[in-house]
């Protein structure tokens, strides 16, 4: 496996590998090349259907196919599937509990220069409000493959959030296990907890290294499942470290930060800060420039962390 | 369709109209206008066309029906109960908290319902999906869908229409219950979808136009549709909203209104009168 690979590219490969299961049907909405579902199409053309630029219809067709017992993966950019087809996902898929996996790609700032119209910073918030919906957001190629495997086994609707930017492997370690709904500890400190996911993990790992120099040991947890949220790991880490930060490639409203805030405020309130896109639209630019503009670089995350730690000491 | 069979179906449909009326009367809630316009089509499909097993509602080889105008459950549930999917008695509990008979069609709760519907515009896509699945598995079941005429104002219907023709879904037969009324009034007063037939034709569909209250026409349209290859078929059925209850006919007011007890009795009397006449014919 190549070291730097986007979760989308990894997904395309995984879909081919696990797509030999004859129950798998793949739908795309004229983005097969970008979503890498063209690899599945090449191998299993009889189980691939391009629905054209019609995401609502794609989701409805997915639901209809799933009523016959098949496992349907339906794809588009996060913006157009979670955004445009919200109500079809809610009423045609989630309400009847059909076995449809919605795959939202190019999520958040990972779509970079396409700009605000394509940068979906709301999808997790939208999907999180739908009963029966699971939300999985892998951090690297290894986790993407595990997520596909797990979704094939787990009956019912799920939303898979993928990104376009190549990432280093972070889960290439022998003790790595993936389970839907269980956060994965990347670094085990006790001074504060940083809950994060997806392509913000590299920045958070940089934060971790820099904090170490100041003798601060952070606990870093990869929240690859946003729903169902791993309450136990959040509460335990809050109790053990006394401060919690979330960092995400998403609006701070509705995403991981909100999910964690809900758990903390009802169970174990500690000094807490949500870091993400601060309830605004993005703009065109390279990812590195976007995280600078929207205050998501390691340096700025550390500034925020210091503020939270100061509260903890009081 | 021979005369005796026609008569049998006319009587059956009148009985089902009574059941739909009673169902709404029990619940003090529900949609009668569209139920009465679509009930003859439903009667023909469930009693004359569809290959189904009431003791095994999820039988894989079965024909399927998506009632995309999912609010017309007084008709659908009456038909399913009469057909034997669940006890007729349950209709008394329609739309109550402890019943499985909810306001809109639900596939997981109601035996015989193939797709959950209620949000207009979504059913045709699901039917297209079922037809695609039939093609993948090389099964020879037929998928039926019934849409309201106002419903085709939803853009998703046309996305689905495009996909059905593109994938040459000749295992898909779609009815439009063309009663010419929607909640806010006549179709052309709200937002004209006409000409519906030409639009579907331009999308690559085979079109049939029938009287949706004439069993002979419904049967022969379905028969012709079943024999057609390479294309989905649209049966545009001219119907009357509130059909069979004089004061409800062609009146948008009765889309979702419940008759009071006096009106209910009047409606029941009218239908019983017709059943009596059909019996002595």
Image (cartoon, coloured by chain):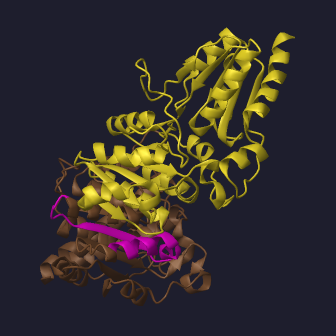
Chain colours: A yellow, B brown
Judge whether residue B152 is colored magenta.
Answer: yes
Percent x, y for residue A182? 49, 24
Is residue A71 shown above or below B198?
above
Q: Answer with left or right where residue B158 lies relative to residue B10.
A: right
Residue sitting at x 32%, y 35%: A153
Hey, which quadrant is residue A156 in on the image? top left
Judge whether residue B80 is colored magenta.
Answer: no
Counting every numbered tag in the picture gives 0
Residue sitting at x 51%, y 51%: A105
The answer to which of B206 and B62 lies nearer the viewer is: B206
Q: Which residues are magenta?
A: B137-164
The answer to which of B236 and B99 lies nearer the viewer is: B236
The answer to which of A38 and B47 lies nearer the viewer is: A38
Residue sitting at x 41%, y 56%: B23
Q: Quadrant of the C terminus of chain B?
A: bottom left
Whether residue B14 is visible to the viewer of this picture, yes or no, is no
The answer to which of B59 and B255 lies nearer the viewer is: B59
Percent x, y for residue B124? 39, 67
Q: Quadrant of the N terminus of chain B?
A: bottom left
Hey, which quadrant is residue A49 in on the image? bottom left
Is residue B168 shown above or below A172?
below
Percent x, y for residue B196? 44, 85
Is residue B278 shown above or below A161?
below
Is residue B122 shown above or below A112?
below
Q: Answer with left or right where residue B27 lies relative to residue B146.
A: right
Residue sitting at x 64%, y 12%: A189
Percent x, y for residue B192? 55, 85
Q: Answer with left or right where residue B161 lies relative to residue A161.
A: left
């Amino acid at each position: 496996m190549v070291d730097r690979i986007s979760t989308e590219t990894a997904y395309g490969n995984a879909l081919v590998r696990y797509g030999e299961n004859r129950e798998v049907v793949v739908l795309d909405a004229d983005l097969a090349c970008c979503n890498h579902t063209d690899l599945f199409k090449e191998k299993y053309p009889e189980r691939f259907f391009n629905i054209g630029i019609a995401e609502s219809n794609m989701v409805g067709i997915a639901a209809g196919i799933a009523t016959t017992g098949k496992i349907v993966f339906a794809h588009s950019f996060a913006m157009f599937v979670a955004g445009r087809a919200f109500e079809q996902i809610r009423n045609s898929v989630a309400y009847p509990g059909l076995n449809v996996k919605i795959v939202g790609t190019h999520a958040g700032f990972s779509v970079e220069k396409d700009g605000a119209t394509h940068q979906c910073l709301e999808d997790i918030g939208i999907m999180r409000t739908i009963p029966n919906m699971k939300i999985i957001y892998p951090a690297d190629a290894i986790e993407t493959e595990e997520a596909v495997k797990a979704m094939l086994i787990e009956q019912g609707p799920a939303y898979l959030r993928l990104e376009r930017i190549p990432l280093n492997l972070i889960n290439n370690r022998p003790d790595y296990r993936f389970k839907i709904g269980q956060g994965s500890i990347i670094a085990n400190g006790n001074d504060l907890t940083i809950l994060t996911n997806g392509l913000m993990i590299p920045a958070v790992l940089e934060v971790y290294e820099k904090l170490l120099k100041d003798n601060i040991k952070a606990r870093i947890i990869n929240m690859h499942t946003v729903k169902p949220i791993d309450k136990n790991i959040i509460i335990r880490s809050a109790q053990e470290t006394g401060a919690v930060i979330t960092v995400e490639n998403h609006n701070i409203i509705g995403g991981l930060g909100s999910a964690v805030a809900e758990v903390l405020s009802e169970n174990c309130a500690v000094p807490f800060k949500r870091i993400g896109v601060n309830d605004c639209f993005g703009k065109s630019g390279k990812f590195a420039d976007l995280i600078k503009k929207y205050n998501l670089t390691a340096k700025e995350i550390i500034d925020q962390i210091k503020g939270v730690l100061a509260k903890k000491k009081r | 369709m021979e005369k005796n069979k026609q008569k049998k179906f006319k009587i059956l449909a009148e009985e089902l109209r009574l059941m739909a009326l009673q169902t709404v009367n029990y619940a003090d809630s529900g949609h009668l206008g569209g139920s009465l316009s679509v009930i003859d089509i439903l009667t023909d499909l469930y009693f004359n066309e569809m290959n189904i097993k009431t003791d095994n509602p999820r039988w894989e080889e079965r024909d399927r029906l998506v009632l995309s105008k999912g609010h017309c459950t007084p008709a659908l549930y009456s038909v399913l109960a009469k057909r034997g999917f669940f006890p007729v008695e349950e209709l008394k509990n329609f739309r109550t908290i402890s019943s499985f008979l909810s306001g809109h069609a639900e596939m997981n709760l109601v035996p015989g319902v193939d797709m959950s519907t209620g949000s207009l515009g979504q059913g045709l896509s699901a039917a297209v999906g079922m037809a695609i699945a039939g093609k993948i598995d090389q099964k020879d079941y037929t998928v039926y869908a019934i849409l309201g005429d106002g419903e085709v104002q939803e853009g998703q219907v046309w996305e689905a229409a495009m996909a059905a023709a593109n994938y040459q879904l000749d295992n898909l037969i779609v009815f439009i219950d063309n009663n010419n009324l929607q909640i806010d009034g006549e179709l052309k007063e709200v937002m004209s979808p006409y000409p519906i037939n030409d639009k579907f034709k331009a999308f690559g569909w085979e079109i049939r136009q029938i009287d949706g209250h004439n069993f002979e026409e419904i049967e022969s349209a379905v028969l012709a549709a079943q024999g057609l290859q390479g294309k989905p078929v649209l049966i545009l059925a001219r119907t009357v909203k509130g059909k069979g209850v004089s004061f409800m006919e062609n009146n948008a007011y009765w889309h979702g209104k419940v008759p009071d007890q006096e009106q209910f009795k009047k409606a029941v009397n009218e239908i019983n009168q017709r059943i009596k006449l059909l019996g002595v014919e």
